[in-house]
Image (cartoon, helix red, strand yellow):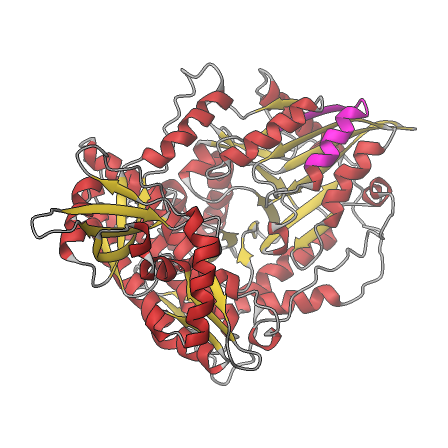
């Protein structure tokens, strides 16, 4: 008899952090793809840098905290925190070397061919450019700079997180004078790229601000000699340690912790390759940085500045034609959105279809005299959010408005505090989230008085209520006035605002209490069907997969014969191709012009498919430490649309990277194949005019589901 397999064996799992670095390498791979327009490729160089910054500030910082605390427990792949840090260090250096090799050897020469030049030294400027740069420095840069010397009377200053600085060694007049250290912060209030006279028709020439300051640094230390000057940058621990149980006021506690973010432990020091060793020694000593945390960079520090070039005017042939999100066939401009929803559930696929109906949903509700209440969760919103304005307007119009603003949305805390205060001043009932949990669910409820009685309209989505990122992220959403979902939506908000914990739900599945059990039940049902000799299939699309219980259940399903296709953009701790364990699992990651963000889950269910969408990935934090919502797709026409989305993504052979049994991701060999770029196809499909149809699904039918 065959020995029962242990599906939790550490050898069957990939480390989460190393998997994330592989994802960032896939992002960088887009910058190396010659089939992509030049300025689009340049954009991915900047995204790689931005991603890496956040990774160090949060994930690497967390591992360092574990090491400091003597934490010895191993992760699901059997690695200690110290072992993970060592592996991360090695892989990151390879990634950064590849990034700068791509920038220096590929991007810069190709830009120069198109008369776009980034000059890396003052000496390379011609006379006209030098004259312009000198005037610019004198008039616009010099007055802003604050040189800070370090000596017995001046302690080492705070070097703020992610800021670009120039360190210098300064020597006084006379042979017996000591060499001192000084630093100057490169001001973020000024443009990083300074445009200079090009001298070429339709040409653009730039010099980086730090190079201009370096060249003129002696003007900041008159009567002293500058022995050397080099740029440097620090990354600090930015994971906020918030004790919510002890905090009397969560808003004030987060405001206090935000200030501490600038004082966190330095976890990475970036310096320009070729830096004077004495200067580097001072920086390491004062910032308390070890050799393994120093990164010598062959090029400009912080390549996020190249994102600005991707939007350069006059070079449309060097980027993709901008996609214009298309209107929904079910909703005409200016139409009563509630009447449209009463005709049947409405599905939206962003950014291929416009996010405007979601904005209009709240806007129309805010001024509709028959709307009695609006309730909504907000995780990340845009800088000038029309949804916030409509919620405030609704409260001023006398409607009951309840908003949960999640203050613990990382790096959006300050932003969300400002919105929360604005909503409170307008008369909205605002709460800041639940103790110990982040509210990550995307739900909006409008309660309306109608002839038949009270009717509830609900929007559920996979992405944030952010009209800006809705043009960049792929997400799905549904409008419904299903009575069952309306009851569940009310229960969700009662749970968030008071002391209410439903014993069961009609249609929605909510984390942290019920969602894990639901997913394991759905996977287990496919496993049972496969063991009974029935056809069994799972298709799941998400951002990340690293939950051990879910992966073990997928392994068991695969071993039983369930065919499993996973579309996982980022972290994937599951390994494919393990004999007798994961031979029936295929994993792909799609990295393209839009950020893949939607979560879709398909279960074959012996020929009666069940399809769900939601806000949660298959990660412990989503299943156990967040308020998340999984919602069913019940309308037949919408089910077909969602299945089509999955089908196209599984056929993508342009932007898909396939995970192989060695743990590496590879692009598909396209030779002799019809090219399918899923994102391009969805853009084209969204432009096809379809007749306005009434849904076959009767939105008000309510048949209680079995308890979860």
Residue 109 occupies quadrant: bottom left
> Would you say 163 lies left or right of 626 here?
left
Residue at 32 percent across and 48 percent down: it is 184
Q: Residue 401, how many percent across, how many down?
A: 72, 25
Q: Residue 75, how many percent across, how many down?
A: 27, 42
Residue 157 occupies quadrant: top left
Residue at 44 percent across and 31 percent down: it is 625
Residue at 59 percent across and 71 percent down: it is 320
> Which of the image's four quarters has the C terminus?
top right
> Would you say 233 lies left or right of 74 here?
right
Farthest right residue? 451
Q: Residue 266, how many percent across, how many down?
A: 27, 41
Task: Say if residue 571 shows up in the picture.
Answer: no
Residue at 36 percent across and 45 percent down: it is 552
**Is the residue 102 above or below the residue 565 in the image?**
below
Q: Residue 453, how many percent across, how many down?
A: 87, 25
Segment tinted magenta in the rendering: 388-404
**Is the residue 560 above or below the residue 150 in the image?**
below
Task: Say if residue 573 shows up in the picture.
Answer: yes
567 or 181, which is in the foreground? 181
> Would you say 392 lies left or right of 71 here?
right
Q: Is residue 635 magenta?
A: no
Farthest bottom residue? 672
460 or 552, which is in the foreground? 460
Q: Is residue 396 magenta?
A: yes
Report how many numbered discs are placed on residues in the image: 0
């Amino acid at each position: 008899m065959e020995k029962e397999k242990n599906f939790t064996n550490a050898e069957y799992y990939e480390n989460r952090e190393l998997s994330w670095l592989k994802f960032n390498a896939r992002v960088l791979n887009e910058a190396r793809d010659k089939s992509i327009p030049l300025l689009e490729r340049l954009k991915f160089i900047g995204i790689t840098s931005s991603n890496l910054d956040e990774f160090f500030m949060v994930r690497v910082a967390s591992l360092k905290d574990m090491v400091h605390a003597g934490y010895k427990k191993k992760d699901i792949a059997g690695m200690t925190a110290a072992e993970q840090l060592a592996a991360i260090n090695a892989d990151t250096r390879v990634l950064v070397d590849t990034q700068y090799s791509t920038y220096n050897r590929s991007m810069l020469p190709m830009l120069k061919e198109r008369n776009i030049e980034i000059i890396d030294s003052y000496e390379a400027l011609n006379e006209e450019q030098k004259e312009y740069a000198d005037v610019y420095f004198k008039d616009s840069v010099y007055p802003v700079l604050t040189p800070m010397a370090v000596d017995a009377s001046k302690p080492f200053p705070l070097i703020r997180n992610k800021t670009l600085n120039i360190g210098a060694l300064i020597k006084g007049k006379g042979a017996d004078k000591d060499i001192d250290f000084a630093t100057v912060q490169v001001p973020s209030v000024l443009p990083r790229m300074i445009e200079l006279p090009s001298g070429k028709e339709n040409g653009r020439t730039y010099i980086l601000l730090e190079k201009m300051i370096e060249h003129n640094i002696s003007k900041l230390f008159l009567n002293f000699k500058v022995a050397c000057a080099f740029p440097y940058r620090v990354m600090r621990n930015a994971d906020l340690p918030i004790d919510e149980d002890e905090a009397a006021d969560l808003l004030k506690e987060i405001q206090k912790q935000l200030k501490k973010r600038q004082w966190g432990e330095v976890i990475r020091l970036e310096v320009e390759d070729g830096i004077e060793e004495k200067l580097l020694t001072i920086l390491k000593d004062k910032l308390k940085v070890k050799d393994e945390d120093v990164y010598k960079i062959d090029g400009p520090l912080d390549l996020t500045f190249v994102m600005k070039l991707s939007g350069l005017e006059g070079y449309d042939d060097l980027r993709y034609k901008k996609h214009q999100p298309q209107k929904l066939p079910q909703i005409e401009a200016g139409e009563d959105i509630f009447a449209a929803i009463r005709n049947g559930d409405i599905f939206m696929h962003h950014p291929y279809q416009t996010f405007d109906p979601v904005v209009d949903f709240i806007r129309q509700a805010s001024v509709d005299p028959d709307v009695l209440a609006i309730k909504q969760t907000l995780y990340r919103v845009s800088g000038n959010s029309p949804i916030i304005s409509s919620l405030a307007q609704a409260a001023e119009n006398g409607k009951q408005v309840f908003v949960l603003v999640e203050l613990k949305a990382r790096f959006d805390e300050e932003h969300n505090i400002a919105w929360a205060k604005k909503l409170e001043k307008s008369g909205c009932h605002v709460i800041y989230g639940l103790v110990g949990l982040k509210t990550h669910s995307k739900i909006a409820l409008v309660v309306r008085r109608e002839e038949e009685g009270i009717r509830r309209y609900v929007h559920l989505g996979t992405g944030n209520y952010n009209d800006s990122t809705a043009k960049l992220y792929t997400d799905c959403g549904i409008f419904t006035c299903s009575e069952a979902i309306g009851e569940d939506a009310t229960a969700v908000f009662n749970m968030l605002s008071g002391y209410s914990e439903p014993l069961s739900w009609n249609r929605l599945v909510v984390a942290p209490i019920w969602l894990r059990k639901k997913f394991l039940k759905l996977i287990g049902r496919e496993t049972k069907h496969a063991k009974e000799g029935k056809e069994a299939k799972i298709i799941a699309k998400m951002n990340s997969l690293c939950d051990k219980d879910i992966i073990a259940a997928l392994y068991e399903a695969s071993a039983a014969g369930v065919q499993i296709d996973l579309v996982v953009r980022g972290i994937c701790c599951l390994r494919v191709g393990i004999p007798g364990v994961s031979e029936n699992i295929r994993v792909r990651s799609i990295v393209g012009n839009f950020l893949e963000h939607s979560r879709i889950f398909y279960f074959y269910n012996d020929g009666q498919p069940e399809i769900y969408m939601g806000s949660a990935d298959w990660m412990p934090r989503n299943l156990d430490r967040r308020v998340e919502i999984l919602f069913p797709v019940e309308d037949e026409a919408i089910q077909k649309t969602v299945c089509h989305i999955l089908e196209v993504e599984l056929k993508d052979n342009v932007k898909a990277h396939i995970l192989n049994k060695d743990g590496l991701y590879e692009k598909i060999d396209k030779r002799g194949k019809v090219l399918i770029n899923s994102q391009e196809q969805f853009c084209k499909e969204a432009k096809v005019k379809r007749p306005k149809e009434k849904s076959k699904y009767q939105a008000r039918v309510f048949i209680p589901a079995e308890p979860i």
